[in-house]
Image: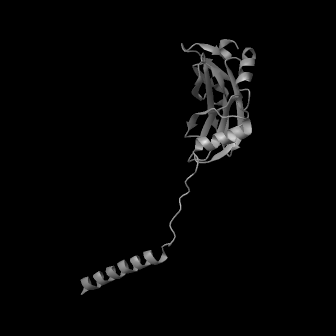
Amino acid sequence: MGKRIFVIAISCLGIFFILYFFTFRSSEPTHLAIPTTSLEESICKKVTEQFGDCQRILMFDARSNLVFIESSSGIIPVLTNQEFTDFKKFIYPIMDFQEFNEEKVERGPINWRADNHVQEDFSIIYGFAEDGAKTIVINSEGNIQPNRFLVRDNLWVWYAIFKNDVQLPVDVTVYDGDGQIIYGEKAGE
């Protein structure tokens, strides 16, 4: 007798579940938003509207949701959403090729820019360095080694993300390929 009641109870629950599923389920199909353009195309369109041209996307950084774009005048960092499906904002100032070449004597091997509070708990320091700078340590920010990627022969972009504000000028030590200091306090800067 106990088994029969158990089987009837399970059957009733099963029927109830099936009725509930089919009754309360939406009759309209779910529409997925499929973008009509790729992220690269949409970001390049915004870059072209703002800066005149967009040559190519150099790098996507999945950890920080950054995209670095090359235009004829320089490199433009762009913040995207976590899925890399939507543009959020440009990060200023852009890295200008001509400015980097003109200030070579004054600046040393690297030229930094910073944008504090790109969004909550997100600040960035970024800049150009020539090929001679093989390793960079940002001493004033806890001895952080920034990320880097190649733009073209002899020109690299270095960048690091922080939760706190970055104060310029930063104290850095720059090493060449042999591990010798070429810029920084120990090199007699």
Quarter of the image for residue 74 reads top right
12 relative to 94 in the view: left or right:
left
Seen at 68% across and 17% down, the residue is 185
Seen at 25% across and 82% down, the residue is 3
Residue 101, horizontal then vertical, whole percent: 71, 18
Seen at 64% across and 26% down, the residue is 138
Q: Residue 159 or 35: which is nearer the viewer?
A: 35
For the C terminus, the quadrant is: top right
Vertical placement of 66 versus 174: above or below?
A: below
Residue 62, horizontal then vertical, whole percent: 55, 40
Seen at 73% across and 35% down, the residue is 51
Quarter of the image for residue 73 reads top right
Q: Residue 158 or 185: which is nearer the viewer?
A: 158
Q: Residue 131 or 112: which is nearer the viewer?
A: 131
Vertical placement of 168 versus 44: above or below?
A: above
Q: How is the image coloured?
A: one colour
Vertical placement of 148 versus 109: above or below?
A: below
* Residue 164 in view, yes or no: no
Quarter of the image for residue 141 reads top right
Q: Residue 24 or 147: which is nearer the viewer?
A: 24
* Residue 23 in view, yes or no: yes
Residue 42, horizontal then vertical, whole percent: 63, 44
